[in-house]
Image (cartoon, rainbow, N blue to C red):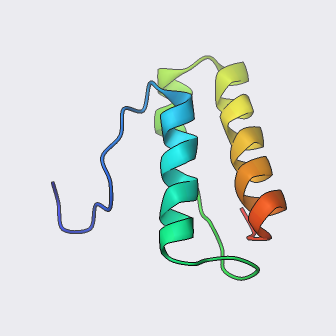
């Protein structure tokens, strides 16, 4: 695992992706501040049909932006 990698996950498992993102933000105590950037949206678009990728983004926004008040 590369030094800059915090956690390895299976990108095919959407719930694991969402859970890992929220867990990392919890571990870093990021709430009511910060910015969460989805840098690899192209990879998700290649892995999933577009509606699944959009569902992932909506779920991340609900789990992070709305629940933790962090901009996604």
Residue 39 visible somewhere in the drawing? no
Q: Is any atom of residue 7 visible in this view? A: yes
Q: Quadrant of residue 31?
A: bottom right
Which of 32 and 1 lies nearest the eye of the viewer? 32
Percent of width and height locating residue 34: 66, 80
Residue 16 % position (x, y): 48, 36
The residue furthest bottom is: 33
Residue 6 x, y percent position in the rendering: 32, 62
Q: Nearer the viewer, residue 38 or 21?
A: 21
Frontmost residue, 1 versus 67: 67
Tell me: 11 left or right of 39.
left
Q: In terms of image quadrants, where is residue 3?
A: bottom left
Position of the C terminus, as image quadrant, is bottom right
Residue at (55% x, 20% y) in the render: 48
Give the quarter of the figure containing the N terminus: bottom left
Q: Is residue 12 left or right of residue 67?
A: left
């Amino acid at each position: 695992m590369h030094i800059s990698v915090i956690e390895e996950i299976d990108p095919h498992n959407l719930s694991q992706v969402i859970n890992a993102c929220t867990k990392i933000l919890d571990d870093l105590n990021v709430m009511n501040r910060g910015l969460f950037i989805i840098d690899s949206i192209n990879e998700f678009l290649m892995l999933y049909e577009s509606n699944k990728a959009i569902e992932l983004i909506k779920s991340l926004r609900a789990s992070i932006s709305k629940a933790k008040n962090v901009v996604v």
